[in-house]
Amino acid sequence: MQVIGGVRRDGSGPDLVDVVNPATSAVVEQYPGAVAADVEAAVSAAKAAYGPWSRATPGERAAALFAWADLLETRAEQLAQRETLQTGKPIRLATGFDVPGSIDNVRFFAGAARQLAGQATGEYSADHTSSIRREPIGVVGSIAPWNYPLQMAMWKILPAIAAGNTIVLKPAENTPLTSVDIAVAATEAGVPDGVINVVSGVGAVAGEALMAHPDVRMVSFTGSTAVGRRVMEVAAGGPKRVHLELGGKAPFVVFDDADLEAAVHGAVAGSLINTGQDCTAATRAYVQRPLYDAFVEGVCELMAAVRLGDPMDPDTDLGPLISRRQQERVAGFVARAQAAGGRVRVGGGMPGGALAAGAYFEPTVITDADRRSEIVCDEVFGPVLVVLPVDSDDEAIAEANDSPYGLAASAWTTSHLRAQRAMREIQAGCVWVNDHIPIISEMPHGGFKSSGFGKDMSTYSFEEYTQVKHVMTDITGVAHKGWHRTIFTLP
Ligand code: NAD
């Protein structure tokens, strides 16, 4: 489950790590986890590849990426199935979103790397010409989560290597399959050995070794805020550059002039995507009172119609959560919300029958929760939407912003002025108007506040994965430069 220097091999850890199909709880793969020695080998392969790859022209790098995208396209179906196998996400989502989105990302970065931007070369001082170079950083260590293993791997790998860095990626230990698949495909497509390395293993061992390695010049992390803090601590020892994409608790603000049907559909799709295990998923709906009852009713009705089932079946709408542990975690949140006075309006439990073997949880709507309660404030990462009434625009926006997180949000209104206000005042890295969830390769993704800093996707991500060098060249040709008089005077 490792790809080091273009070669697929086993990790050298003593413990086997399980890859489990969350729909059945069956172990589908077991592999020896990576340990420090594997990380050492991967970093050293990435270091060896860095010189030639960083000196390759952007056009040469683009050609390798386009060839990689073409090869991945021929394996799209297999990639989707492997992604569904390890995550339990419905095959419709893997086929329609994860895989094509990832391949589009490869093609976007193949082109974008040829257009790195900087300030114009010029004579900003009368005696010098100044120019800007945008250079790669070196070996990047990246750590990814389990919710979108393929897309998260791509979001980490692409801006890094397109800009001339080399990378060692550590996928989440329970979802390494597609990260390994794409790294193998990259080698086959002609991406030089060592440019993309994958070490699969547990965070506390492989992740820690990767972050701390002295030859890793930057750590790029997507995952929980708790581990993000740990990443910053370890990186401080370098110090090394850090890019963090962390948790979220996205508000969904419905003004009283909203298109109710659009808002209801948007809330159900936006909260259930990836079984709610999406850092931008709609989690807290603030609905102005005139629409509140109809909104709750509409969302409950639509959620009750969502079909849970075998994620490999194209008719399935909603798959299981990632694991039994996550299922218990979500059930715990819902039980505590109820104990604290929240009303479960639909769902709220684990389905029985044929689904009892998997980590399924019913789509759930909760109302009457206390504003400051855990279910409203903390990241559940499950198919749970809390709906709360609000009385004014001011209150809606204040509640939306009353969170340590700031990854994404949406505003639902037919008023141009209200939309403008929401865009301006909601504190989040992405604000949708009359939609919730869509992303696109050309536009950045990244958080405000405790949701992290730095951007994935888009040309903005080059800010993270490149460093700017100022080159200042004397254009006078004289030995005695005017400014020397500030230091010494000659007769
Ligand atoms: P997690 O933080 O538990 O794990 C993420 C990764 O970190 C895994 O690869 C894990 O092995 C590794 N890790 C764990 N402990 C480590 C340590 N001590 N040192 C180094 N690495 C370590 O998160 P998760 O449960 O896999 O993912 C869910 C979280 O990710 C949610 O909070 C979600 O919001 C967040 N997320 C954020 C984004 C975003 O773009 N902002 C995208 C996806 C997921």
Image (spheres, grey):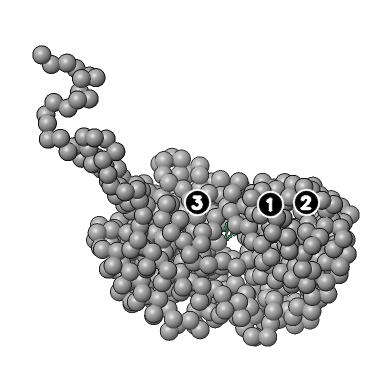
Quadrant where the image shows the N terminus: bottom left
Q: Is residue 159 visible?
A: yes
Residue 4's place in the image compared with 307, above or below, is above
Ligand 1 quadrant in view = bottom right
Q: Which residue is drawn at 29% across and 43% down?
A: 470
Q: Residue at x 32, y 51 (%)?
A: 134
Name the disc covering residue 393, or none: 2
**Foreground disc of the pair 1, 3:** 1
Q: Residue at x 40, y 41 (%)?
A: 238
- Give the SS element for disc 3: loop
Residues at badges 2 and 1 in contact (C-beta under 8 Å)?
yes
In the image, is the residue at mark 1 within 8 Å of ligand 1 by its beta carbon?
no
Q: Is residue 38 left or right of residue 398?
A: left
- Give the SS element for disc 2: helix
Taking the view exactly as shown, the residue that stands out farthest to the front is 416
Residues at badges 2 and 3 in contact (C-beta under 8 Å)?
no
Q: Where is residue 198 in the image (x, y as percent from the top left)?
A: 42, 65
Q: Could you tell me the amino acid type at mark 3?
A: Gly
State the image quarter where residue 389 is shown: bottom right
| Foreground of the two, 43 or 32 | 43
| Foreground of the two, 468 or 209 | 468
Q: Which of marks 2 and 3 is nearer the N terminus?
A: 2
Name the disc covering residue 454, or none: 3
Query: How many other residues sit within 10 Å of disc 2, few (<14), some (14-19) or many (≥20)?
Result: some
Q: Which of marks 2 and 1 is nearer the N terminus?
A: 2
Q: Identify residue for label 1.
A: 421
Q: Where is residue 138 in the image (x, y as percent from the top left)?
A: 33, 53
Q: In this view, does 476 lie to the left or right of 425?
A: left
Q: Position of residue 194 (x, y in %)?
A: 32, 64
